[in-house]
Amino acid sequence: MKPIRRPRSKRHKPNAEINVVPYIDVMMVLLVTFMVTAPMMMQGVDVDLPKANSDPIKVSSSEISEPLIVTVTRTGDYYLNLGENNQQPIRLDLIGTQVKKILDQKPDVEILLRGDRTIDYGQVVKLMTILQQAGATSVGLISDRP
């Protein structure tokens, strides 16, 4: 005995599957865009950092905030990463007053020093002294990995 077949209806049932191919395409375009633009977003002045064989300092996620970076270039110019004027050189005596104002508002802000490896050590010591007088309890030094 043959099973009885129902006649097929000419109507198609709705397809409940989501086509994810367009979403994957959009995500790939975004990924490539961020990979290309991320290195360009690095703020600051170009300096030749000294090489050091040290591991990065581990910081807990609750301590993460924007650090205050002071830069000394090989020409002896000082830069402070403040807002839109971070590409303008700043006088050494003004760095102290600016850092003091920042530390008065955010006493937990991390202060980092980027110095070109060809600069005079005395410039770094002067800068660190001014930062200490402004209220900085510790100053981190930025180096490049070899």
Image (tube, grey):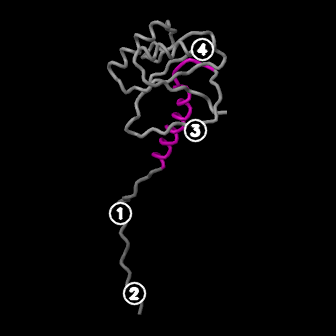
Tell me which numbered mark, 2 or 1, is placed earlier along the sequence: 2
Q: Which residue is mark 4?
A: 73
Residue at figure coordinates x 35%, y 69% from the top left: 9
Whether 28 is among the magenta residues is yes
Q: Which residue is mark 1?
A: 13
Residue type at mark 3? Asp
Residue at figure coordinates x 42%, y 27% from the top left: 66
Q: Are marks 4 and 3 in contact (CB under 8 Å)?
A: no
Whether 45 is among the magenta residues is yes
Tell me which numbered mark, 3 or 1, is placed earlier along the sequence: 1
Secondary structure category for the residue under label 4: loop
The numbered dot on residue 55 is 3
Residue type at mark 1? Lys
Residue 93, percent from left and from top: 46, 6
Q: Are marks 1 and 4 in contact (CB under 8 Å)?
A: no
Nearest to the eye among marks 4 and 2: give it: 4
Q: Estimate the spatial distance between the alpha carbons at disc 4 and disc 3, rounded to whole Å.
A: 24 Å
Tell me which numbered mark, 4 or 2, is placed earlier along the sequence: 2
Q: Estimate the spatial distance between the alpha carbons at disc 1 and disc 4, rounded to whole Å.
A: 70 Å
Tell me which numbered mark, 1 or 4, is placed earlier along the sequence: 1
Residue type at mark 2? Pro
What crowding class fits label 3: few (fewer than 14 Cα within 10 Å), some (14-19), or many (20 or more)?
few
